[in-house]
Structures are given as structure tokens and as C-alpha cells.
Amino acid sequence: MITAGIDAGNQTVKAVILKDGAILGHSIAFVGADTEASAQQALDEALKMAGLSRDEVGKVFSTGAGRKLVSFVAGNATETTCDARGAVWLLPATRTVIDVGAEEGRAVRCDAQGKVTDFSVNEKCGAGSGTFTEAMARALEVSLEDFGQMSLGSQQNIQMNAQCVVFAESEVVSLIHAQTPKEDIARAVHDAIADRITSLTHMVGMEKEVALIGGVARNPGFVDALRRSLGCDISVPDDPQIVGALGAALMAAG
Amino acid sequence: MAKYPTKKFDCWQLAKEMQRKTFEGVMTAREQGKILIAGSSGFQGCFLTGLAGADGFAFLSSEAYGGMLSANTELQKECIREVERRGYSPDLCSYMRNYWGSAFLNRSPWGEFPHADLYVQPAICDTHAKWTTTMAEYHGIPCFVIDVTEAMDFDKQGGHHKQYFIDQGLELIEWLEKHTGKEFDDERFIESVVNHQITSDLWAEICEMNKAVPCPMDQKSQYSLSNAIIREHHSPGAVRFMTLLRDEMKDRVAQGIAAVGNESCRLIHDNCPAWYALHIFRYMEKYGVVCVGGHYGMAFTSSWAYTEDGRLKAIKTVGYPGWQRPSNWEVALRVLVSGGGGGALLPDAGRKFTLGVARDWNINGALFHLNRGCEGWSRGRMEIIYALREMGLPTSTYEGSTGDMKDWNEAQVLNRIDSFMESLDLSRLED
């Protein structure tokens, strides 16, 4: 049976096409004003990659903040449920899933079947999300890609005191004025987010193995900071952004 | 087809009528030549009855009024905006900000703000004393603050705490006589203390009946039906109402009448709810969830005790074999001080109480409102959550404020609830 999952996030829509335990296609599209149209676009692109037509897909499930805005699906489930399902399917030893997306950070504890046993979400605050890194990269006038890599070259550990995105940006500017190397500032930013996410993770009672998913998992500086903060290794799947959509496709498959 | 029969509460209309009469009494107190006294809900109703008789005064319960403004979304916005415009911090108690905003704007849901003649305020949390002293200064009226915060859990305190409270009670009586010209009547006071005990006993008995499966009274209804004990626990009217409600609850349990027809999951909900968003309880019902109670609500004026093995139990403080009516006002005051109750606003007491409910009320999980609008009820909530998790009970939280919609994100809250429901293996039964 061919199924599809759509993760309608705050910044991007992800789609995954699944057939008999294999991912045939996936895609990522930016969310426009019309979530439904963005979801349709993401699905079309994933279908194109899979070499399939829409008629060949059985059930489609949605997840993500905009999941209820996608009308052409058979059902929907929350990001929490789909993250766990998708992560355990990809990395079966996973028992704790950390998802850091554009606007939310989330820690989920789950069992061997990918069923959620506890979860905690950082919402209403940008400090534990991708928005934080974007704002800090802007303040340093470097691209997001360079920002992550840059922090790996840091030679000294400095402390970011501000936990709020707005005040942290001011602190970054102060550090620039103090001629602090950009590498050290980048590391301090990643350490601050990692500490926040670590706190969330301990709230649910971290159990190994730990998987990191979501867009921020593509940032090597953050991955390094989180490993140090948690004090353990973390697994990052090849396409960490599509794990929620994969979970939705698995839900659609039943 | 629902699993269980459901039925509206027969005494629902009576509860609404009592509420209407209370606020009507507040708004017309001056025309009727009654003293209007405002302040936090608490035991002071007994003192006021001793002074003026049950019908001789009108009482504006500041929390009930703040809560009502919180539910009035349009007026709430204006009240909160007015208070912040005057430079007060948005992290102060949201009930208080609504109350103050209503006073500053001189507007209420029924016309002008009901200006009190006196304030009598038990300082039951870190905000309450300032709430009324600020208002008393603003309106230029006398105010009496009773220092009780940490003495609320009398079981934990030494005898000197009780004596401290009793001494303040004596001061209050003299103060009330001085400011009203009325004479305190010991007999009326004793009667009101006994009424207070009866309503306390009845409320605990009522809440204890929610152990039944199916649960006869959902938490949203519990909030509404508890109004009588919040506003006028000392009055004969409250005794009559609570007796009716208790009898109706007995019938509902006997007949298996459910609050939620498809009850399949029973949750504790704790902390004051967001009064403008009570629909989240109905939202959860679509998953077959009934919220059976929590420390906030069950531990209002109520008679609880713990058995030797730590089980929470409703008790009788009146009418048991050997019970004697207080012989004089001082004995009555000591009785008032020694009443049961769940130690409202005390984190340790909240943990003990919530664990008691989790143990014996057939609970499947707990949902906590991380409430930015009430410091008193929010103290120690995370510790309670950890204690429940140690028991193996699934828990979740959502953020909000009991009386300030600026702290509310409906989509995020519903998403959080959806996630929690899915983790409990619940799916929506209806749309």
C-alpha cells in the first residue's frame, strides 16, 4: 500500500511517500499564506520524485501546526505522535526524540513501537527553536549554514546570559563590539539553545538512544552543543526535517 | 449510542439564580440600606454575619468578581489594558488586575463598579493584601487585613498560629463594630460558623462521590456549582443548596448517571482554569475524557482529612456522635480555625491532596494549567506533576492565564491537548 504523510509546519511543509517500508519520495516546500496549496505543492513534488501519480496513493495523513488546514487527507495526528513514530521507524533503538523546528522545541519519550510515553514542548518562546539561530546568524551577518559550521571552530567557551531572542540579539551585538571572535559567539548561541532543550529533555526523563530531528538538526554547531549538554551521543537521521511527515505516512499505513 | 446515561443537574437553575441574587444584592446594597463589604472569599463571612446577620450585609467576593470579569472577554480586555496603562505590571494576579481595571474604569457587567463601604481581606496569598489595600486607598475606605497565609494549614502549625489568628479575629470584631456602629452578636456568629462547617462537610462529601464510575459531576460543572460555598458558605441558603446538590449526587451515583456519556478516561485538571476558555473541557469530552476534579475546586471550603495510610477522605465536623454546638464565640472561632480543608494555596498540602485524588478517584492522568495569572495557585505545581509522574501517572501541561487572554494561545493549547490525548491512546469520538 502506498501512503503519504504531510507535515505542515510553521515555516515549511514536508511530504513523504511511503510504500511497503520504503521511502519512495520526499519534498520540502515553504509555507505560503495558503497552507493547503503549500501542502499540495509539497505532495506533488514528492510524488514526482517517487514517479507516482496522486491516484496511486492510498491514504494521506497530515501532522504539524497546520495539519487541520489540509483538507485532502484521511486523518491527522499531532507532531508529538508522528515524531516518535517516524524516528523509531528510522532508528529503532530510539527512546527519546528531540525535535527542534522553526518555532518549537520538543522532547518526546517513547517505547519500541514509537508510542509516546511522555513529552514536553517549548512554546511561546523562541529561545529553544530555529528562530533563535536565525536571528543570531542575522546579528552576526553570516548565513545560517556558515553559522553552524563556524561554531565548531570556537577556541573559548563564553556564556550567553540572555534567554530571550530579543535580548540575546543585543548581547550578541555587545559581544561583537567587545571584539569577541564570531566563532565563540556562535558556539555560545548554540550552547544556550542546547541548554534549553536539555532542560526539556530531562523533564520527560531522557532514555537512550536519543534522536535529533527537525530543521535545526542540520546545524552541526547545534548538534555538537546538544551532545555536550546532554552528555551522550545523539543520532541524526539523513533527512531530519521529514521525520514528522514520515510518521504521518506510517500512521496512514495503519 | 453513549455508554452511560447523562442528565443535567436539577439544581443547576437554582445555582444560577443564587449567583444572580448575590450579585444583584451587591449592586443594590446601598438602596437596601445594607453595608457592602468586599474582600477575598474566606471565613470573614462568619464575622460579617455576626455583625449584621446573614441578610444584613452584601458581600462582594473579589475572586468571584475577578473570575466573572475574566470570563467576560470584552470587559476583561478593557480592564487589563486600563491597569497596565496606569503602570501596574502585567505579571501581577490577573483576578486583581481585572478587579482594579473595573474599579478604575468604574464599570461592571451591570453598570457602575460596586463601590464597597469596607474591605476585609484575609491575606491568603502574596497578592491579596495588596489587592485590597490598594483599592481601599484608591476609594478612601477602611481596610482590615488578616494575616493568615502560612497558617492556612493549621494541622502543620503550632498552637501559637491558631492563637495569632484568634487574636486577629478579636481585633476584627472590634474594628467592624467601630466602622459600622453595629454590635457583634455572638449567637449569629456561632450559627454562621456551624453553617460554614456544614457546607464544608457537604462539599467534601460531594467531591468524594466523584470516585464513582461513571463520574457524576464533571469539573466544569463543579466550578459552577461550588459558587455557593465560595461566596456564602456561612449562610443558610448555601446549606440548603449544598444539601440539595449532595442528595442529587447520591441519586446520580445510584442510577449511574454520567457527566460524560462516553467516559473512557478520567483526568485531574489542576490550577484555576482560564475562565474565558472553559470550552477546553468540552473539547476533551469529545475524546471521552471527564475531568473529575483537582486541588483547585475540591479543596475550596471543605472538610478533608487523611487516614493513617495517607488516603484522602471527606469527614464530618458537624453532627457526628458526641458533637457539640460551640458554646460561645471564642469556641466557635477556634472551631473555624481548626476546620478541615485541603490547605488551599500551600504547595505541600496541594501535593498531598492531589496524590490522594490520584490514588482513589480512578484517575488515568493529569492535565495542569501553567497559570501565569495566579501566583498563589501556581506555587509548587511542577513538584506536584513530578510526584504524579513518580506514581506512574501520565501528565501534561498547557500555558495560559486564568484572567488575561494575552497569555492564551488557543491553537497551541488545543494542539497540546491533542498530543496528550494521543499519548493516552484516545481518539476523537465525535466532531
Image: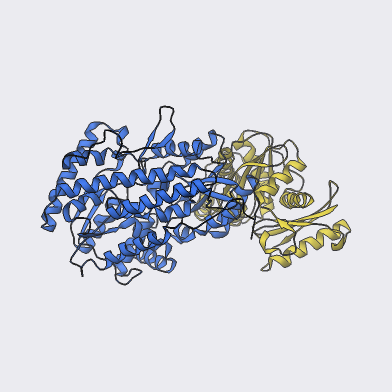
Chain colours: A yellow, B blue
In terms of depth relative to the viewer, which is nearer, B379 or B154?
Answer: B154
| The image quarter in which residue A11 lies | bottom right
* Residue found 30% across the figure and 66% down from its top: B24
Q: Is residue B302 above or below residue A145?
A: above
For this orientation, the residue located farthest to the top is B308
Q: Position of residue B245 (x, y in %)?
A: 40, 52
| Residue B378 visible in the picture | no
| Vertical side of B196 occupied by B383: above or below | above
- In the image: residue B373, left or right of residue B321: right
Foreground pick, B78 / B164: B164
Nearest the eye: B415 or A162:
B415
x and y percentages locating residue A4 in the rendered image: 79, 55
Counting every numbered tag in the picture gives 0
Q: Quadrant of the N terminus of chain B?
A: bottom right
Q: Residue at x 73, y 41 (%)?
A: A88
Q: Which residue is at the far bottom?
A: B111
Q: Is residue B206 left or right of residue B418?
A: left
Quadrant of residue A153 in the image? top right
Residue B52 screen position, x and y as percent: 17, 56
Q: Report the quarter where the C terminus of chain B lies.
A: bottom right
Q: Is residue A5 left or right of residue B18?
A: right
Which quarter of the figure has residue B140?
bottom left
Q: Is residue B32 left or right of residue B259?
A: left
Give x and y (percent) for residue B90.
39, 58
- Is residue B119 visible to us here? yes
